[in-house]
Image: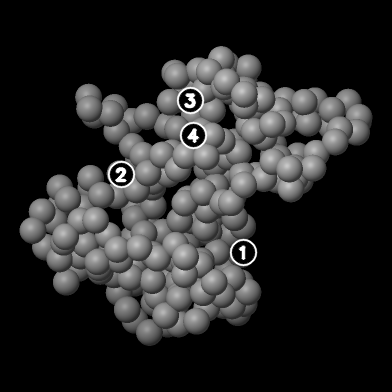
Amino acid sequence: MKEIVTFGGGTNGTAMLINMVKYQIKPDEILFSDTGGENPYTYEHIAEMNKWLQSKNFPLIQTLRYKTKNGDELTLEQDCLNNNTIPPVAFGWKTCSQKFKIQPVEKYLKAKYPTEKLRIWVGFDAGEERRIKANPNENFENYYPLIYWGWDREKCIEVIQNTGLKQPGKSSCFFCPNMRKNEILRLPDDLKDRAIAMEKNATKLAEIKGLGRNKSWTDVINADRSQLKIDWDEEDWHQPVCECID
């Protein structure tokens, strides 16, 4: 059976890889699905992890991206701009993670291993048992090592710290509607401007006001730039994390 690691670029996936290296559980492949809109620190972390993995004689992280029927790469950001909308998770749907995170991995694995049995390592931590599910592909078996090891988020952070690697931070798109106010305001100006452009371009929102669902990121970013106070009750708009958060 082939061992395939799906790496989200964040804390859980990093701790999982560290323990695999420690016990020399060498996977056949380590795959990262890039939406094209990851936070800059996630791309930096993947580069750092690849240097570390190479020093341990482990496979490098391979980046996959969504491709259209014509074979052209398409980012989630461009998809939203093309369709005058914002990420589906803002409306309560998880189709963005399905399309830009899960689908590229499944397509790649089916093409490369059409008949082989694969064990898919998934980095959900102890406390996320609600996210366990069987893989719909009969040749794929989902495996949740952090849950079986009893590692929660705090344990994962500790393991990374003890290894000497930098903490990766939470992986997500920089325009993810599940981001909190402080995370939005920490974004570089160019990414804030791209988020504002997405909201301005989104004409198919119905009752949704913007990337904050019933709040507009444009309002909170511009208010911060003008040093104005704006009400932002996070409990009023924030929803459970999407499937891509690691």
Q: Are marks 4 and 3 in contact (CB under 8 Å)?
A: no
Pointer 4: what residue? 88
Type of amino acid under label 1: Gln
Among the two numbered marks 1 and 4 on one chain, the one whose residue lies closer to the N terminus: 4
Report the mark closest to the observer, 1 or 3.
Answer: 3
Type of amino acid under label 4: Pro
**Figure quadrant of residue 156:** bottom right
For image coordinates 49% across by 56% down, the residue present is: 9
Q: Secondary structure at mark 1?
A: loop
Among the two numbered marks 4 and 2 on one chain, the one whose residue lies closer to the N terminus: 4
Q: Secondary structure at mark 3?
A: helix
Between the C-alphas of marks 4 and 3, the distance is 9 Å
Callout 3 crowding tier (Cα within 10 Å): few <14, some 14–19, many ≥20: some
Q: Nearer the viewer, residue 8 or 99?
A: 99
Pointer 1: what residue? 167
For image coordinates 8% across by 58% down, the residue present is: 115
Among the two numbered marks 4 and 3 on one chain, the one whose residue lies closer to the N terminus: 3
Between the C-alphas of marks 1 and 3, the distance is 30 Å
Q: Secondary structure at mark 4?
A: helix
**Residue 81 placement, left or right of 67:** right
Pointer 2: what residue? 103
Q: Which mark is residue 210?
A: none
For image coordinates 25% across by 49% down, the residue present is: 106
Report the mark closest to the observer, 4 or 2.
Answer: 4
Between the C-alphas of marks 1 and 2, the distance is 27 Å
Q: Residue furthest front?
A: 207
Q: Which mark is residue 80?
A: 3
